[in-house]
C-alpha cells in the first residue's frame, strides 16, 4: 500500500461518517437550540420550534410544529415545513428548490379597534435605517422552486375596526404551485382551494410569473356568505343584511409592469338569496337570485361588459318621507364627523376629522356594456308620506328586459317593461332609449290603472273623493332631449268608471262610464290633436245652496297666496310669449248622459233631472275660427225632450255662435219652488215649451227667447218676501189663449264686449216688465191682441141719463167680446156707474114724465076709456099735465103749494110747481142706482146676446156714483179677473 494511501482511505471513510454525524445529529440539534434561543429576540409572543430534521445527502430540511403565540391562541404556526434543495444549486447561478411542503399552517390576522395589526406587533423589527436615495431596482434573487404544496391550512381573520367586529375562518386551505421562480420565463402552475363556514369555497387555478409579475387563470368563489363581511358596508350605509350568498367565477389576466393591467373574461356571478333591511327592521330589498354571465372587465379600458344578466324575484321598498326626501336618500346621506354607526371610537374618527381632499380632475368614465338583462317577478312597494293621507302603490309582478345597454349613453338600447300596477292595472312599454343626448321611441300601453291614489294629491285643493277610475292608454312616445325638449305622443287614451263624491254632502258629483280620446296626437309646446272624444254615460250634479252658493264653489278649498319671488338685481331680457298650444278636436260624442240640478235656496226645494243626453259636437280648433256644429238631444225628468243645435267656437264664443235650444213638454210642477219664490204661487199643473235661439257675431248678441206655457194652473199662495206685488193670476189669465197656452217672445240684443251687459238679468227684467204691463193695463193688452190698441176697453161711456149703448160703445164691446173669447180664463166685472151732476136732472125729468103717464093712465081707467096694457106707451096731452102736476107736487113733496104762488098766472104757477118737483128728484140716489144698474145690465146683455159670451163670465158689481160734471158722458168701469 503506498505511503499515505491508508490515511487517505481512513479520511475518506471517516469523512462521510463525520458528515453524516454532523448533518443528521449535530447540525439539527444545534440549529434547533439556536432557533429557540433567538426566537424571543425577534418575537413578542411565546415562540417555540419543536423539532428540526436535516438530511445532508439529499439536502432535505424539515421543521416540526412551530408555534408563535400563547398556547391555544397561536397567531402563527404550522405542523410541518419540508424543503429540499437541489445539488445543482452549487454550480447553477440560482437557488434551486426541488420541493417545499407546508402542512397544517395556521395564521391569525387580527386588527384591533385602532387599526393595529397583530402580525406587525408579533415581530420585533429593527429600527429602520436612515432613508437613502434609492437607486434603480436591481435584479431579484435568482430562485426556482419545482413545487410548493400547502395543505390543511387555516386562516383566522378578525377586524374590530367596524362598528360590528368581523371574524372569518378558513379551515381548509390548500395550495399547489409548480415551477415557481424568479428566473426569466419561469411560469408557475398553481391551484388553490379554501373553504370555511359561512364564507363558502374559493378555487383558484392558473399561471403565475414573478418576473415580470403577471398571472392568468380562473378564480371561483362558491356560496360565499356576505354576512361576515357586511359590517364594512354597514359602516358606509346603515343597511342591515338579512340574507346574502355570493358565487363568482371568472377567467382573469393580471399584469404588474409599468402599470396595473387586469382583465376578466367569461365572468359569472350569482347572488342568491339577498335581503336588506333598515336598522329599525323595515325591509328595503329582497332578491331571490341575480345571475351575471358572459361578463368581462378591462381595467385599462375602464370597461365592463356583461353578456347576460338574469334577475328573479326582486322586491324593493321605497318611500318619500314627509319632508320630501326619499328614505333611501336619507340612508346614504353623508354622516357627520362624530361617531360612526355603532358608537365605537376608532382610527376612522381621526380620518373623519381631516379636511376633505380636493377632488381629482375628472378622467375617463367607466363604460358598462350590457348585452341582455332580464328581471322577472319583481315587485316595488312605493309609499308617499308627503300628503296628509299616506299613498301606497304596489308595482308588480314586474318584468324588465334591456338589450345592448351602454352606460356612456351614446347608442340606443332596447327596453321592454311589463308590470302590474296596483291590484289589476297593467303597464307595458317597449322601444329604443338613448341616454346622451336623451332620446326615446317607446310604445307604452296601460290597462286598468287605478286612479284612486291621486285622491291624496287633489284633497288639498277640492273636497272631493275619487271613488273609482281606471286609465287605459296606448301611446307611441318619441322623445328627444336637448336645449328644447321635443316630445311626441300618438295613440289613444280612456278613463273608465270615473266616480267622484262630494265629501261635504256625501253625494255623487261627476262620473262617467268611459271617456275615450281616439287618435290622440300631442306635440310638446305646439299642438294637441284628438280625432274624436267619446263620453259614455256622463253624469254631473249642480246645486244652488240655501245661501245662493253652489256645490262647485263650496268644494273648492281656498289656497294661501304665494309670496312674490324676489326680483333679481339684473333683469333678464323679456322673452316673447310662447304661442298658445294648438288644440284640435275632430268631434265630441255624448252617449246616454245625465245630470241633476237642484236649488235649495227655494222653499220648497227645486230639483230636476236631465237624462238620455245623446249628441255630437263637430270639429273644434283654437287656431281656426271655424265654428263647430252642435247637435245634442235629451230629456228633462225622463219624458220632456230637449235639443241643442247650432254651431259655436268654444275657444272664442264671442266671435261666432249660433245655438238653438228647445225644451218641450217640461212639467211645470218642477218649477213650483221658483214660482213660489218670485210669483208667490205654487204651480198646480202645466207644461213648458222653451225655444232659445242665441246668435253672436263679433260680440254682438241677437237672442230670441220663445216661451210657451201649456195649461198653466196656479195653486195655493206662498208667502215669499221676493214675490212681485202683482195680480199674477190675472196676468196668467190675460196671457193664456183659448187653447190654454201662454206664448211669450223675449228678444234680447246687446254688446257682450260691454262688461256691464248681462243676458239673464235682461231676460228676467223683460219678462217681469211684460207681466207688470199685462197686469197693470189688462184692457190695453187684450186690445192689442186684436190690433186695436187705440180702443179704450176699460170703460163704456153713456150719454147723461141714458143706459143705451151708442155706436162707439157697441164697437168697443165687440172688440172686448172677441178678446174674451180668446182668453177663456178671464171673467169680466161691470161696475154700474152714474153721476148726480150729469145724470140727476135728466133722471128727474124722466121720472116726471113717468108720473105724468102713470097719472094719466089712472085717469083714463077712471073714465072707463080703453087703455093699453101699460102706461109706457101713453102720450099725455099738454092740457092734462097741469092738473096732474098739482097732484104730483102734493104726493112728492107732502104739502100744499106755497100760498104766494096762488096769485101767479097759471103758466108761471105750473113752472114753479115743476121746478119744485124736479128739484126733489134731482139728487135721488134711488134713481141714480137704478140708472147705474141699467147701464151694467145693458153691457152684460150686449156681450151675452151680441158677443156670444157665457153670462157666467160676466159679473155685475155693486153700483157707484161718480163725480162727473154736468152734461159730461158717464163711463162705466170694467174690470178683468181670472177664473
Image (spheres, grey):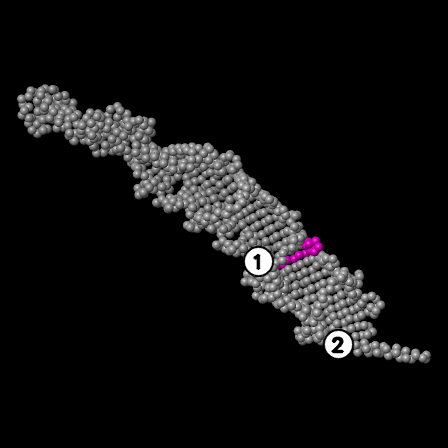
Quick one: 580 or 401, which is closer to the camera?
Answer: 580
Give coordinates of residue 22: x percent, y percent: 81, 77
Q: CA distance from mark 1 to mark 2?
A: 59 Å
Does dot 2 land on a helix, a strand or a loop? helix
Q: Quadrant of the C terminus?
A: top left
Q: Residues within 10 Å of mark 2 (few under 14, many from 20)?
A: few
| Residues rendered magenta in the picture | 283-304
Q: Residue 570 colored magenta?
A: no
Query: Which circle's residue, 1 or 2, is located before the other in the chain?
Result: 2
Which tag is nearer the camera, tag 1 or tag 2?
2
Q: The N terminus is located in which quarter?
A: bottom right
Characterize the local packing of mark 1: few (<14), some (14-19) or many (20 or more) Cα atoms within 10 angstroms. few
Q: Quadrant of residue 664?
A: top left
Residue 461 numbered mark, or none:
none
* Element under disc 1: loop
For residue 524, which quarter of the picture? top right
Amino acid at each position: 500500500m503506498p505511503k499515505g494511501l491508508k490515511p487517505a482511505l481512513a479520511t475518506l471513510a471517516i469523512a462521510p461518517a463525520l458528515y453524516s454525524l454532523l448533518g443528521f445529529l449535530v447540525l439539527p440539534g444545534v440549529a434547533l437550540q439556536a432557533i429557540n434561543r433567538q426566537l424571543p429576540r425577534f418575537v413578542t409572543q411565546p415562540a417555540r420550534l419543536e423539532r428540526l430534521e436535516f438530511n445532508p445527502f439529499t439536502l432535505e430540511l424539515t421543521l416540526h410544529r412551530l408555534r408563535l403565540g400563547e398556547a391555544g391562541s397561536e397567531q402563527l404556526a404550522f405542523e410541518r415545513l419540508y424543503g429540499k434543495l437541489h445539488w445543482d444549486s452549487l454550480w447553477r447561478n440560482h437557488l434551486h428548490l426541488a420541493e417545499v411542503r407546508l402542512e397544517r399552517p395556521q395564521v391569525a390576522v387580527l386588527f384591533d379597534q385602532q387599526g393595529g395589526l397583530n402580525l406587525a406587533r408579533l415581530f420585533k423589527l429593527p429600527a429602520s435605517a436612515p432613508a437613502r436615495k434609492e437607486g434603480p431596482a436591481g435584479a431579484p434573487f435568482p430562485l426556482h422552486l419545482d413545487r410548493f404544496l400547502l395543505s390543511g391550512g387555516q386562516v383566522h381573520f378578525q377586524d374590530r375596526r367596524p362598528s360590528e367586529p368581523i371574524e372569518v375562518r378558513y379551515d381548509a386551505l390548500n395550495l399547489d404551485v409548480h415551477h415557481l421562480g424568479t428566473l426569466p420565463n419561469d411560469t408557475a402552475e398553481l391551484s388553490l382551494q379554501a373553504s370555511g363556514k359561512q364564507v363558502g369555497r374559493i378555487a383558484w387555478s392558473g399561471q403565475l410569473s414573478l418576473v415580470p409579475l403577471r398571472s392568468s387563470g380562473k378564480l371561483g368563489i362558491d356560496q360565499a356568505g356576505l354576512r361576515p363581511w357586511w359590517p364594512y358596508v354597514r359602516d358606509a350605509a346603515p343597511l342591515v343584511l338579512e340574507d346574502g350568498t355570493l358565487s363568482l367565477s371568472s377567467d382573469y389576466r393580471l399584469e404588474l409592469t409599468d402599470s396595473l393591467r387586469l382583465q376578466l373574461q367569461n365572468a359569472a356571478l350569482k347572488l342568491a338569496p339577498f335581503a336588506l333591511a333598515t336598522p329599525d327592521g323595515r325591509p328595503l330589498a329582497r332578491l331571490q337570485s341575480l345571475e351575471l354571465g358572459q361578463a368581462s372587465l378591462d381595467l385599462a379600458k375602464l370597461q365592463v361588459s356583461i353578456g347576460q344578466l338574469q334577475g328573479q324575484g326582486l322586491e324593493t321598498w321605497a318611500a318619500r318621507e314627509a319632508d320630501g326626501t326619499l328614505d333611501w336618500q336619507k340612508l346614504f346621506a353623508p354622516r357627520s364627523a362624530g361617531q360612526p354607526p355603532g358608537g365605537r371610537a376608532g382610527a376612522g374618527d381621526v380620518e373623519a376629522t381631516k379636511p376633505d381632499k380636493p377632488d381629482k380632475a375628472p378622467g375617463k368614465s367607466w363604460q358598462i356594456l350590457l348585452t341582455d338583462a332580464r328581471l322577472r317577478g319583481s315587485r316595488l312597494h312605493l309609499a308617499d308620506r308627503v300628503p296628509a293621507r299616506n299613498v301606497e302603490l304596489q308595482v308588480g309582478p314586474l318584468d324588465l328586459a334591456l338589450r345592448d345597454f351602454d352606460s356612456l349613453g351614446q347608442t340606443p338600447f332596447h327596453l321592454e317593461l311589463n308590470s302590474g300596477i296596483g291590484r289589476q292595472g297593467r303597464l307595458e312599454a317597449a322601444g329604443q332609449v338613448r341616454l346622451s343626448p336623451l332620446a326615446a321611441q317607446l310604445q307604452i300601453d296601460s290597462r286598468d290603472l287605478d286612479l284612486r291614489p291621486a285622491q291624496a294629491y287633489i284633497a288639498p285643493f277640492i273636497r272631493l273623493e275619487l271613488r273609482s277610475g281606471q286609465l287605459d292608454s296606448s301611446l307611441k312616445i318619441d322623445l328627444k332631449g336637448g336645449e328644447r325638449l321635443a316630445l311626441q305622443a300618438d295613440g289613444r287614451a280612456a278613463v273608465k268608471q270615473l266616480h267622484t263624491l262630494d265629501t261635504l254632502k256625501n253625494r255623487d258629483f261627476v262620473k262617467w262610464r268611459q271617456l275615450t280620446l281616439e287618435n290622440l296626437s300631442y306635440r310638446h309646446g305646439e299642438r294637441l290633436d284628438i280625432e274624436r272624444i267619446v263620453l259614455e254615460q256622463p253624469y254631473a250634479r249642480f246645486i244652488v245652496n240655501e245661501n245662493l252658493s253652489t256645490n262647485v264653489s263650496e268644494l273648492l278649498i281656498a289656497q294661501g297666496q304665494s309670496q312674490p319671488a324676489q326680483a333679481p338685481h339684473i333683469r333678464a331680457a323679456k322673452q316673447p310669449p310662447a304661442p298658445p298650444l294648438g288644440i284640435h278636436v275632430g268631434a265630441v260624442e255624448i252617449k246616454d248622459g245625465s245630470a241633476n240640478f237642484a236649488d235649495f235656496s227655494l222653499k220648497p226645494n227645486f230639483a230636476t233631472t236631465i237624462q238620455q243626453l245623446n249628441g255630437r259636437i263637430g270639429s273644434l280648433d283654437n287656431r281656426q275660427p271655424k265654428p263647430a256644429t252642435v247637435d245634442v238631444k235629451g230629456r228633462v225628468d225622463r219624458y220632456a225632450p230637449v235639443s241643442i243645435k247650432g254651431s259655436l267656437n268654444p275657444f272664442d264664443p264671442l266671435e261666432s255662435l249660433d245655438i238653438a235650444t228647445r225644451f218641450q213638454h217640461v212639467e211645470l210642477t218642477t218649477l213650483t219652488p221658483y214660482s213660489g219664490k218670485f210669483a208667490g204661487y205654487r204651480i198646480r199643473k202645466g207644461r213648458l215649451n222653451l225655444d232659445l235661439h242665441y246668435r253672436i257675431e263679433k260680440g254682438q248678441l241677437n237672442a230670441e227667447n220663445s216661451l210657451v206655457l201649456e195649461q198653466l194652473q196656479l195653486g195655493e199662495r206662498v208667502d215669499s218676501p221676493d214675490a212681485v206685488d202683482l195680480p199674477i193670476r190675472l196676468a196668467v189669465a190675460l196671457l193664456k189663449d183659448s187653447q190654454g197656452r201662454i206664448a211669450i217672445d223675449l228678444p234680447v240684443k246687446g254688446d257682450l264686449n260691454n262688461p256691464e251687459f248681462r243676458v239673464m238679468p235682461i231676460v228676467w227684467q223683460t219678462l217681469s216688465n211684460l207681466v207688470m204691463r199685462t197686469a197693470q193695463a189688462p184692457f190695453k193688452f187684450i186690445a192689442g191682441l186684436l190690433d186695436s190698441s187705440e180702443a179704450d176697453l176699460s170703460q163704456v161711456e153713456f150719454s147723461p141719463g141714458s143706459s143705451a149703448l151708442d155706436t162707439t160703445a157697441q164697437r168697443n164691446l165687440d172688440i172686448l167680446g172677441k178678446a174674451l173669447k180668446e182668453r177663456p180664463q178671464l171673467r169680466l166685472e161691470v161696475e154700474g156707474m152714474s153721476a148726480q151732476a150729469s145724470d140727476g136732472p135728466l133722471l128727474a125729468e124722466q121720472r116726471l114724465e113717468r108720473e105724468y103717464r102713470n097719472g094719466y093712465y089712472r085717469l083714463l081707467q077712471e073714465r072707463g076709456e080703453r087703455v093699453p096694457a101699460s102706461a109706457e106707451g101713453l102720450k099725455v096731452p099738454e092740457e092734462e099735465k097741469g092738473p096732474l102736476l098739482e097732484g104730483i107736487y102734493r104726493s112728492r113733496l107732502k104739502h100744499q103749494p106755497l100760498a104766494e104762488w096762488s096769485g101767479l098766472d097759471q103758466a108761471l104757477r105750473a113752472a114753479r110747481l115743476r121746478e119744485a118737483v124736479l128739484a126733489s128728484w134731482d139728487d135721488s140716489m134711488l134713481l141714480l142706482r137704478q140708472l147705474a144698474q141699467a147701464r151694467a145690465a145693458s153691457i152684460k146683455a150686449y156681450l151675452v146676446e151680441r158677443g156670444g159670451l157665457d153670462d157666467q163670465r160676466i159679473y155685475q158689481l155693486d153700483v157707484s156714483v161718480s163725480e162727473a160734471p154736468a152734461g159730461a158722458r158717464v163711463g162705466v168701469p170694467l174690470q178683468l179677473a181670472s177664473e
